[in-house]
Image (spheres, rainbow, N blue to C red):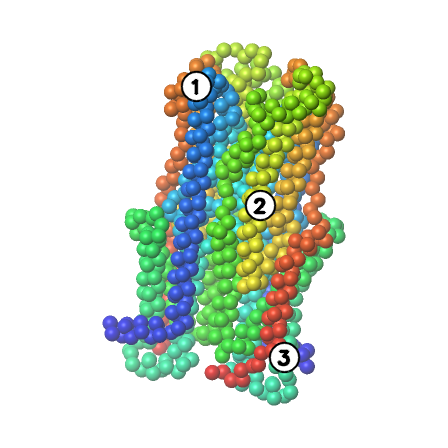
Amino acid sequence: MIFSIARHELVTLWRQRTLKILLPMMTLLTLLVAVNHWQQQQDFIEVQQQWQQLNNEKWEAQPDRHPHRVAHYGSMAFRVISPLSFLDAGVNPYVGNVLFLEAHRQNSSQFKQYLSSQNYMQLGSMTASTLILLIWPLVMIALAYRTVSGERQQGTLRQVLSLGVSFRQLLLGKALAYMLVTLVFLGLVFGIAAVFLSQAVLDTDIIQRFFWLFALYGLYCAIWVEIILLVSSLTTGNNQSLSALLLVWLLITIIVPKLMSSSADWLYPLPDRAVFDIRTAQAIAQIGDSHNPDDPHFDAFRQQTLDQYGVEHVEDLPVNWRGLVMQEGERITSEAFEAVYADVSRSIEDQRRWVMWGSLLSPYILSRSLSGSLALTSSDHVQRYEMAAERYRYSLIQSLNTLHAEDIDLAHDREQKVSQEYWAQLADFEYQPPPLKADWATMRQSVIVFSLWLFAVFSVLMFIRPRMTAS
Amino acid sequence: MRRYLLELKLFWANRFNRWLLIAYFVAALAAIVMGNNAYKHELSLVAMAEDDYQQSLLDYRDKHDAGELKPGYMGYYLFHPVAQTPSVWTTLFRGERDESPSHLRVRLLGLQTQLNASDPVNADTLLSGQFDLAFVWLFLMPLLIAAMGVNVLADEKSSGRWSMLLSQVAQGRTIINRKLAMPALILAAVNIMILALAVVLTDLHLSWALVGVTVLVLLYQLCWWLICRWIVMLDRSASFNYLAFLSIWLFFSFVIPGLSYLYQVKQQKPGADAAIVFEQRQYMNDSWDRDKYADFADFLERFPTWSDTAPLGDEFDWRWYYAMQHMSDVVVADHVQQRVASKKASYEQGVLFSWFSPVMSLQYGLNRLADADTTAYLNFIEQVSDYHRQLEDFLWSFLFFNKPFEKIDFEHMPDFSYESDPKPWMDATLLKLLLIMGVFVALNLNSVRRAAWW
C-alpha cells in the first residue's frame, strides 16, 4: 500500500513542472559549485604541499649554525585542507593556513585560502553543503507543501482514507516519495563527486567520511520531509501550509543559527590579537623573564641547577648554562601561552555549548556541525591542527635548546656553531587528521540530538489525526 | 483619507501582520543591542592595550632614570599597539570587520610577519555571520514585505471579496495600491523608529549620514515593494506569489553574491601569499650567515638618509640588525603589492556584481559607511606601514647618528591614530538602487498594460 501511495505521489509530481525544473536546476548548480571548488581545492593542496616540501628542504640545507639561531629560523607549517572541502568548505575560508613556528613566540596562522570577503554571503557561502542543507529543503517545501493540505482542499483526502488506507500509511507513502526524489538529487551529486574524489583520494578514512556525509544529508532531508508532512497535515489549506513552512525554514536555517552565534559572541567575548598577546606577555612576566639577568625566578633556577650538579658557578657546569636558561625560558613561555590560550579555548567551548542549545530548535545547526566534522573542515579540526603544530614547535625548540646546552660551550657561546648534520636529524612536522573513529567521540552529542530530531518529528507525525476538511 | 484609515484598521486587525511586525522590531532591537555591545567590547580592548602601552613606556622612563635604557633593546622589546578604531556605525553594520584583525601590536622587526597575524576566533561564529541591523534590513525586511503584501490580491480573490471590491471603484489598481501602501507606510515608520532607537541606545548622533542611511533604507524598502507589487499584478495564486518572491529574494541575496564570490576566487592564485612570510624569514635569518659589512653597505646605499653613520664593528650591532629586518620587508615588497592588488581587485569585482542585486549594493554602501570593508582594511594596513616607518625613523635617528636618548624624547615617540577612509558611500549606492528599481518600475508598468481589468 505504502509503495503504491509513493508511486502515485511521484506520478503526480512528475506531471507538474516544478519538479522537472527544480530537480535538474539544483543538481546542476550543486555540481557546478562542487566541481569548481574541487579544482580550487586540488590546486591549493598542491601548492601547500610544495611549500611544506620547500620548507623542509630549506631546513636541511641550513649551514652550520648556532642552535639558537636555528630556533629563531624556526619552521613553517602549511595546512593542507581536507579533500572533502569541495563538498563542505566548513571554516576553511575563515582561517589562516600558514603558521610560522619559532622560538619564544606562538604565532597565529596567517593567510586565508582566498582573499575575498565572505561578508556578502550572509545566508551561507556558495558550497555544495550549503545548497544541500539550506536550499534543498526549500525546494522540497516548494514540491511538497500541499501534499496533504492539497488533498484535503480538493476533498480527495476523505476519499483516500475511506478506501481503507490509514493516515499513517498515507504519510509514510508520501514520505517515501519525497525521500526518493531527495535520494535522486543526492545520488547524482555524490555520484559525480565520487568520480572526482576517486581520482585523487584512496584513503579509506576519507571514503568512509564521504559515505557518512551522504547518509547525514539524506537523514537531514528526512527530517525536513517529516516537518513538511507535519505542517501540511496540520494547517488548514495550501497557503497556510506554505507560509508556515517558509517561516519554519527561515527560523531553522537562518534566524536561529545566526541569533545563537551572535549572542554567543556577546555572552562569551573573546580577546583580539593585541590583547591576547598582552595577556601572554603579562603571564610570562609573572613567572620569570629569561632575558633579565636579575630575575628572581631565574636566580632560584640558577641556584637549583648549581645544587643539582654540586658546583659553585655556572661556568663549572658540565652543560651550557645559557642553553638551560633558554630551555627554562621556553618552558615558561609555553606554560604562560597555554594558560592564556586555555582561557580563550574555554570561552570558545562555552560559545559552542551555547550554540548547541540552538540545535534543539534547529536541526540545521546540528547538520552543519556534523557535516564539518565529517568533512574534516570544522573549527575543532583546525584547532587540533594548530595545537599539534604548537606541540611540534615546542619539542623542536627544546631539542635545539638541548643542543645548545650540550654542544655549545658557555665561553664564547655566540661564536660557536653546530654542524649542519644535526638539522636533518630533527623530525619534520607531519600532521595526520584524526581518524573517523576518534571523531565519533566529539560528534556523539550532536548525533544524539540529531537522532532525537529524526524520531521526535516522526513520532508526532505517526500520532497526529488528520483534519478532514479545509476550513 | 478615511479609506486609508479603514485600510489601516484592517491591516492591524490581522494578527499575522501584527506579530510579524513585532518580531521584526524585536529582532532589530536585539541586533542593535548586540552590535552596540560588540562595538563597546572592541573599544574596551583598544583601551586595555593602550593602558598596557602607557605602562611599558613608564617602565622605560624608569629605566632611563636609572641610566639603563638602551634604545636598541627598546626597538626589540617595546610593542606598539595599532588599532583600526571602529566607526560608531559598526554598531549597526559590522561588515567585514570580523574577518581581518583590526587591533595588533607592532615592533621594529620585519613588518609583514606581524601584520598578517590573526585574531583568536571561534571560526564557527564567523561561519554563521553576525546578526546585525544590516542583516535584519538587507535580508529579513524583504521577506516581511512579502509576508504582508505579496498576497493582497490573491487573498481577496480566494475569500470571494474581490469582485465586490472591484465593483466599487473605477480601477482595481486603486484598491491594490491602497492595500499595499498601508504595510509599506507602517514598515517605513517602524524602520525610522528603529533608527531613532539606535540613536538613543548607542553612540550614534544625528548627522547627514543618518539622513543618508534613512533615505537608502527607505529606497531599498521601496525597491522590494516594487518587486512585491509586480508579483501581485501578475495575478497568480497565493502559493505562486510566495515562491516567486522567494526565488527573487534568493537570487539577489544568495545566488548573485555566491556567483560573485566564485568568480572572485577564480581570479586568485592559491597559496601565493605564503611567499611573503616564507621569504621574509629566509632573508632575515640568512643575513646572519652573510657578510654583514657588505649587506650593511648595500642598505646604506639604498637608504642614503642613514649613510652618515659610523662603520660597523665586529660586535653585534643593532643598526645592522634593524637594517636587515627592514630589508626583509623590502625583499618581499613585490609579493605584498601583489596581495594588496589582488585584494583590491577582488573587492572591485564584488562591487561590479553588486550592480545586479539591491541586497549587495546596499550592503557595499553600508559597509563603506561603517568603514568596515576591504577598502578600510587596506587603508588600515597602509597606515600601520607608515607608522612602522615613523617608528624606524625615530629610533634609528638615535642608533645611526649616535644621538643620546633623552627623557624628553619619549614625548616625541610617534603615536598611531587611525584615520578612516573618506571614500564616498552614498552616491554609487543610490544610483545602483535607483537603476534596479527602474527595472521593476518598468515591469510594473508592463504588467499594468497586460491586465485588462486594471
Q: Is residue B65 above or below residue B376?
A: above
Amino acid at pointer 2? Ser
Residue behind mark 1:
B65
Chain letter of disc 2 in the image: A
Q: CA distance from mark 3 to mark 1?
A: 87 Å
Disc 1, SS: helix
Tell me if A150 is positioned left or right of A38 in this view: left
Confirm whether circles 1 and 2 share one chain.
Answer: no
Amino acid at pointer 3? Arg
Label 1 environment density (alpha carbons within 10 Å; few <14, some 14–19, many ≥20): few
Rendered-image quadrant of the N terminus of chain A: bottom right
Q: Which mark is residue A168?
A: 3
Q: Which mark is residue B418?
A: none
Residue A76 location in percent, x, y?
A: 64, 34
Question: Which is closer to the viewer, label 1 or label 2?
Answer: 1
Amino acid at pointer 1? Asp
Q: CA distance from mark 1 to mark 2?
A: 41 Å
Disc 2, SS: helix
Evaluate if marks 3 and 2 touch, with contact meaning CB atoms under 8 Å apart.
Answer: no
- Residue B116 in sight here: no
Confirm whether circles 3 and 2 share one chain.
Answer: yes
Residue behind mark 2:
A345
Q: Is residue B81 above or below residue A304?
A: below
Residue A189 location in percent, x, y?
A: 65, 60
Residue nearest the viewer, comparing A78 with B303: A78
